[in-house]
Image (spheres, rainbow, N blue to C red):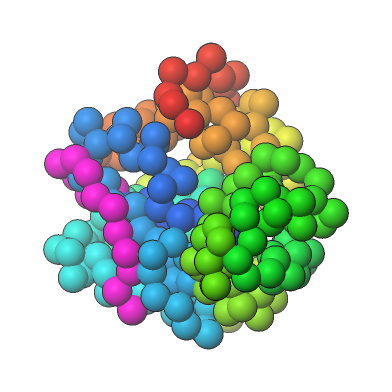
Amino acid sequence: MILHSVEVGEGPRLVLLHGLFGSARNFGAVQRALAARHRVIALDLRNHGASPHAAAMDYAVMAADVIETLARNDALPAVVLGHSMGGKVAMRMALERPDTVCALIVADIAPVPYPPHFCEYAEAMLAVPPGSTRAAADARLASAVADRAIRGFLLQNLQPAAARPWRIGLAEIAAALPAIGDWDDRAGGTFRGPTLFIAGEYSDYIRAEHRKPIRARFPSARFVTLRGAGHWLHADKPSAFMAVVEGFLAAAEHGMISTPNPITAAPSNIPS
């Protein structure tokens, strides 16, 4: 499957992969900042953003989509940065086709199965009637999604007052949530290239017990914890996130991997 992409900048290739219910535009500020030194390609994964819809959403299939799209755009090999679900896609890509990945950055996810998350979000979104305004859809989601910021994130996918309320493949995503939470380690593989795992201080997606399975598949992995950040690292602490990513990229490009120490973010100068 050829995915929708947004590309800016020139230089070494850097690919951005969003998380569940997200899209390429979630990385807009990050992409613009990194474009000063890189050719930055943000992709909409299948069933998300403006990319095609399909029933299958296992990580092997999604990684194959990314490789096919980048090959079409003459953008391989590349540094790949993935957040959450996108991080699992990036890891699967690196393990199955290490020749396509120069270096790997995984934002707040581990190569382990998680209990299915967001089922209640998907159910609430599916219950939004056709033709709903944004206000009506927001009210409909409120009982299942108490956090206003998360509702706002989900509502980015709304097509207000449309016969088809959601532009994403919502039914396909909802059906695939068990596969999205899963991780099939039987596929094996090892990626020995430069690898950075960035965890949020207030997130439990990367825990101490995950370091062993991470090291087993990514023996060069280094770890940074972003202070004051939850799961949405690049939204919670954009300046700190950018400092960590740019430091890793500079070190990787010079063949000297030395990740920054965990840092406390300064006030952000990157627009949301």
Where is residue 14? Give x, y as percent.
29, 48
Q: How many circles with numbers are drawn on the protein?
A: 0
Who's the residue at 61% across and 78% down the image?
171
Where is residue 86? Give x, y as percent.
49, 59
Q: Is residue 108 left or right of residue 219?
A: right
Where is residue 3? Give x, y as percent.
33, 69
Q: Is residue 28 left or right of residue 153?
A: left
Whether 136 is among the magenta residues is no
Who's the residue at 51% across and 42% down the image?
222
Q: Is 239 drawn above or below residue 253 in the view shown?
A: above
Residue closer to the observer: 240 or 186: 240
Who's the residue at 66% across and 80% down the image?
175
Q: Is residue 102 visible?
A: no
Residue closer to the observer: 119 or 151: 151
Q: Is residue 272 visible?
A: yes
Whether 2 is among the magenta residues is yes
Q: Is residue 41 left or right of residue 205?
A: left
Q: Quadrant of residue 128?
A: bottom right
Q: Which residues are magenta?
A: 1-14
Q: Is 237 drawn above or below residue 211 in the view shown?
A: above
Q: Is 170 drawn above or below residue 104 in the view shown?
A: below
Q: Quadrant of residue 114?
A: bottom right
Q: Quadrant of residue 250?
A: top left
Residue closer to the observer: 95 or 183: 183
Who's the residue at 62% across and 70% down the image?
130
Residue at the outermost top position: 266
Image quadrant where one finds the N terminus: bottom left
Where is residue 244? Give x, y as percent.
45, 30
Residue closer to the observer: 101 or 232: 232
